[in-house]
């Protein structure tokens, strides 16, 4: 008879990340839910992203991060890297997370692979965002027994070396907040089409 493995309790630092993901999803829902496709795809200026593009960019970015993150955590689990302390980011990791937080102080062009489509339907982008967040929250809870400081992976977006899995979770939450904040500013921009 096979016994099922009991999940480790979720620690305070991981619960904080789960709460941050819930909060940014709630904020995003407030921005997106009442809008139609025309409003979602309206842009405040030439070259500026629409709300749909902000969410589409998050979906593309998070999909790439999730894939690398999941592989790193599962490899750490296979190596027996058991959690012994809370997530601890390096100075660089903390600085990178702080740079991503809204309000945006530094604009950096997105890599070509995660630039958003010109036009997206609400029925495409928002359910995908919710699906990804639901999946990530479950993963975070399931990773409670793994050392997320020693589970590392190559940054899928460029020259910034290797990332700790715990830091990557903080990066995802901060990056999501950044673009949900950007989307809320689009909705409040002059000329935004009202219902």
Image (tube, rainbow, N blue to C red):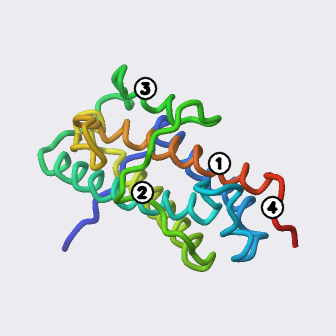
x 72%, y 54%: residue = 186
4 up-or-down from 48: above or below: below
Tell us which disc is closer to us: 1 or 4. 4
Label 2, label 3: how far apart the Cα atoms are? 19 Å
Mark number for residue 94?
A: 3
Label 1: few (<14), some or many (≥20) within 10 Å?
Answer: many
Q: Where does label 2 land, which residue?
A: 62
Q: How far across and how far down the image is residue 177, in percent?
A: 59, 45
Closer-to-camera residue (164/103): 103
Horizontal side of 185 relative to 11 (left or right) equals right
Report if the CB atoms under discs 1 and 3 are less than 8 Å apart: no
Q: Are marks 4 and 3 in contact (CB under 8 Å)?
A: no
Q: What residue is rendered at 60% in x and 80% in y? A: 123
The residue singled out by tag 4 in the image is 192
Whole-angstrom CA distance, mark 4 to mark 3, is 35 Å
Q: Which residue is mark 1?
A: 182
Point 66% across, 46% down: residue = 181
Q: CA distance from mark 2 to mark 1?
A: 17 Å
User: Quick one: label 2, few (<14), some, or many (20+) residues within 10 Å?
Assistant: many
């Amino acid at each position: 008879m096979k016994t099922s493995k009991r999940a480790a309790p979720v620690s305070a630092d991981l619960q904080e990340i789960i709460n941050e993901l819930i909060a940014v999803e709630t904020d995003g829902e407030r921005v997106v839910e009442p809008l139609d496709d025309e409003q979602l795809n309206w842009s405040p200026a030439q070259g500026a992203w629409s709300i749909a593009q902000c969410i589409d960019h998050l979906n593309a970015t998070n999909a790439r991060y999730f894939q690398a993150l999941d592989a790193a955590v599962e490899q750490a689990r296979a190596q027996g890297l058991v959690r012994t302390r809370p997530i601890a980011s390096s100075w660089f990791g903390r600085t990178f997370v702080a740079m991503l937080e809204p309000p945006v102080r530094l604009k950096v062009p997105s890599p070509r692979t995660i630039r958003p489509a010109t036009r997206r339907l609400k029925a495409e982008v928002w359910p995908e965002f919710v699906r990804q967040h639901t999946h990530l929250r479950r993963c975070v809870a399931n990773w409670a027994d793994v050392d997320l400081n020693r589970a590392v992976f190559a940054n899928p977006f460029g020259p910034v070396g290797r990332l700790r899995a715990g830091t990557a979770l903080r990066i995802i939450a901060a990056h999501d907040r950044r673009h949900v904040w950007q989307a809320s500013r689009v909705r409040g921009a002059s000329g935004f089409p009202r219902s």
